[in-house]
């Protein structure tokens, strides 16, 4: 009996042992699985953290590059010429150079031996490098940046387009809301460069009931209104009104703002002193800064854009269309700019210049300078014995109180002192543009007819060192132009003066509507017509119809001038496949 019981106990012990071993194995497996899951989760969490950090490091690279551009507007010229991104075409010379010495930038490294810049505050764990493509900067003012961030073994890359923030971010920009004292009287010594309050001759120009501003507007001065003007875009001003009222001076009916809270107070946007830097774009001796020189014309010059993609240029005083050094003692004549002389830019038919017609060279700057008198200048014409006759055989002398292009026209009253100066760097422009160009003048620009785009791809910049005039010739108070209305498709900038209608306050009837599709920037407000306070119909001159060219948010006419201080905004960015792996090698 006892043996039988003992035998049964031995069998139970074996079963128990098997159960214990099985349960232990299961528990051990569970523990191993738990440890594996835990370790895997830590690894995944670490990888996720590095992956997110790499993107943040790439962003930090873009922001760091923007800060360098803000401190040095010429920094766009730096990069690594060995980068496949910065130097996409091996057959074309690189357009970027590496900064050296104390200016060396670790972010320009490439390859496994190349350097990375460290994200501040990361303890050295987050790094970035970037590559710059500036090949389109001369054409439209944009830069392309490819930034790669690295944390641990993870890398991520971002592609961003950057554009200078400047005058063409606004449909309408002014430094001073006062009239320009020298616009109608260039000999005036009155100083109207005074911010609000101003008075007397320097009193402000008002936005009235006829005016519609269909785009963003900024003034460094106080904005004045005297009727229900319509402001359909964002409105900002440096003027900070006392108390809690709006930042403007309003009389009569209140204006209408599309954005609640406008006009808003912001900081000053400074104007450059001159447009002289654009003349540098016509030098042939600067292959890095000016890889594709523009065209230099001398003395009064007429440009007519033809709808077939050509332009007709008359420039009787021009001898060389490119100069070869800073002192202009050497010059060349590239074919794209026309041929100086009696068979080209100074060609005569009958008793008038007809000039030369040639294809519009796209993405080009054209600069019109005053006739130099220094004998060492390749475009000089001495002031004696004949200061009134361009230098070519058969040339037509300047008119009395006018130029050799035929201005003033028959029966036209001289609109102001020194108008149509014989040797002035004045530009006369009209027509239908096919292409992308910027026209600049050392003196005045006269828009003598409609200036329109042939397609939605065309783009024009007009930059006068002095006033940009909407040509409106008069015989006493009688208009000499039969058609009413005027249209200008362009980004317009008067660096030192104003955008204004010639004879805006003369006559007994209005001239219709001045339509501008683009952007207007000027040092002083320029009147375009007159009307009684609160009136809905102009008495003289033009009513305004100004419309913003939305393309200017992302691009610009070639080499269009920027404020004296500027920042670069990111227009577009996308994440792309990582360019480099964690060793620094291209993927």
Image (tube, rainbow, N blue to C red):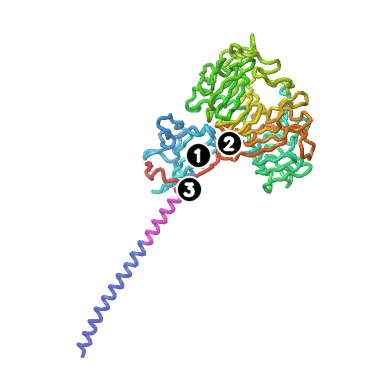
Query: Residue 587, percent across and down?
Result: 37, 43
Q: Disc 2 versus disc 1: distance between alpha carbons? A: 14 Å
> Looking at the picture, does residue 68 appear above or below residue 318?
below
Q: Going from the N terminus, do you reach mark 1 or mark 3 first?
A: 3
Q: Disc 1 versus disc 3: distance between alpha carbons? A: 14 Å
Q: Disc 3 versus disc 2: distance between alpha carbons? A: 25 Å
Q: Is residue 444 left or right of residue 57?
A: right
Tell me the SS state at disc 3: helix
Residue position marked by numbered label 2 in the rendering: 566
Q: Nearest the camera: 83 or 544?
A: 544
> Looking at the picture, does residue 1 appear above or below residue 401?
below
Specify whether residue 245 is in view: yes
Residue position marked by numbered label 1 in the rendering: 65
Q: What is the chief secondary structure element of the magenta stretch?
A: helix
- For disc 2, the neighbor class at 10 Å (few under 14, some 14 to 19, many from 20) is some
For image coordinates 73% across by 44% down, the residue present is 255
């Amino acid at each position: 009996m006892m043996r039988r019981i003992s035998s049964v106990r031995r069998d139970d012990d074996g079963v128990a042992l098997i159960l214990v071993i099985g349960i232990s194995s299961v528990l051990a497996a569970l523990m191993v699985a738990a440890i594996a899951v835990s370790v895997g989760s830590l690894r995944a969490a670490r990888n996720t953290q590095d992956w997110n950090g790499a993107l943040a490091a790439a962003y930090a690279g873009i922001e760091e590059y923007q800060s360098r551009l803000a401190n040095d507007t010429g920094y766009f010229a730096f990069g690594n010429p060995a980068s496949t991104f910065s130097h996409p075409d091996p057959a074309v010379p690189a357009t970027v150079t590496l900064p050296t010495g104390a200016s060396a930038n670790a972010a320009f490294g490439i390859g496994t031996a190349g350097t990375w810049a460290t994200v501040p505050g990361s303890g050295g764990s987050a790094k970035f490098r970037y590559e710059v493509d500036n090949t389109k900067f001369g054409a439209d003012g944009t830069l392309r940046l490819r930034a790669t961030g690295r944390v641990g073994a993870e890398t991520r890359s971002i592609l961003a387009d950057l554009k200078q923030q400047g005058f063409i971010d606004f449909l309408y920009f002014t430094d001073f809301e006062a009239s320009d004292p020298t616009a109608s009287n260039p000999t005036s010594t009155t100083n109207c460069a005074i911010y609000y309050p101003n008075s007397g001759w320097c009193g402000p120009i008002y936005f009235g009931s006829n005016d519609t501003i269909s785009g963003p507007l900024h003034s460094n001065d106080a904005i004045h209104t005297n009727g229900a003007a319509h402001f359909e875009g964002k409105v900002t001003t440096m003027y900070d009104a006392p108390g809690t009222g709006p930042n403007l001076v309003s009389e009569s009916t209140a204006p209408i703002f599309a954005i609640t809270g406008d006009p808003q107070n912001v900081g000053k946007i400074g104007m450059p002193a001159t447009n002289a830097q654009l003349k540098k774009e016509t030098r042939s001796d600067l292959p890095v800064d000016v890889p594709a020189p523009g065209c230099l014309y001398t003395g009064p010059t007429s440009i007519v854009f033809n709808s077939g993609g050509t332009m007709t240029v008359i420039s009787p005083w021009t001898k060389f269309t490119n100069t070869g050094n800073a002192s202009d003692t050497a010059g060349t004549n590239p074919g794209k700019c026309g041929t100086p002389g009696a068979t080209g830019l100074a060609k005569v038919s009958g008793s008038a210049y007809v000039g030369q017609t040639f294809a519009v060279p796209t993405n080009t700057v054209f600069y019109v300078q005053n006739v130099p008198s220094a004998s060492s200048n390749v475009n000089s014409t001495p002031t004696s014995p004949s200061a009134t006759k361009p230098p070519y055989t058969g040339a037509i002398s300047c008119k009395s109180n006018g130029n050799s292009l035929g201005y003033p026209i028959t029966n036209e009253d001289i609109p102001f002192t020194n108008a149509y100066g014989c040797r002035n760097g004045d530009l006369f422009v009209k027509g239908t543009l096919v292409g992308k160009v910027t026209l600049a003048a050392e003196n005045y620009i006269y828009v003598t007819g409609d200036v329109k785009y042939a397609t939605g791809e065309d783009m024009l910049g007009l930059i006068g060192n002095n006033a940009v005039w909407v040509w409106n010739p008069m015989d006493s108070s009688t208009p000499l132009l039969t058609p009413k209305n005027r249209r200008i498709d362009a980004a317009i900038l008067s660096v030192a003066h104003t955008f204004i209608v010639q004879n805006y306050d003369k006559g007994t009837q209005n001239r219709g509507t001045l339509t501008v599709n683009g952007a207007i920037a000027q040092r002083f407000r320029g009147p375009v017509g007159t009307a009684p306070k609160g009136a809905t119909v102009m008495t003289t001159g033009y009513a305004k119809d100004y419309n913003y060219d939305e393309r200017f948010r992302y691009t610009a006419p070639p080499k269009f001038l920027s404020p004296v201080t500027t920042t670069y905004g990111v227009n577009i960015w996308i994440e792309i496949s990582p360019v480099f792996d964690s060793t620094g090698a291209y993927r």
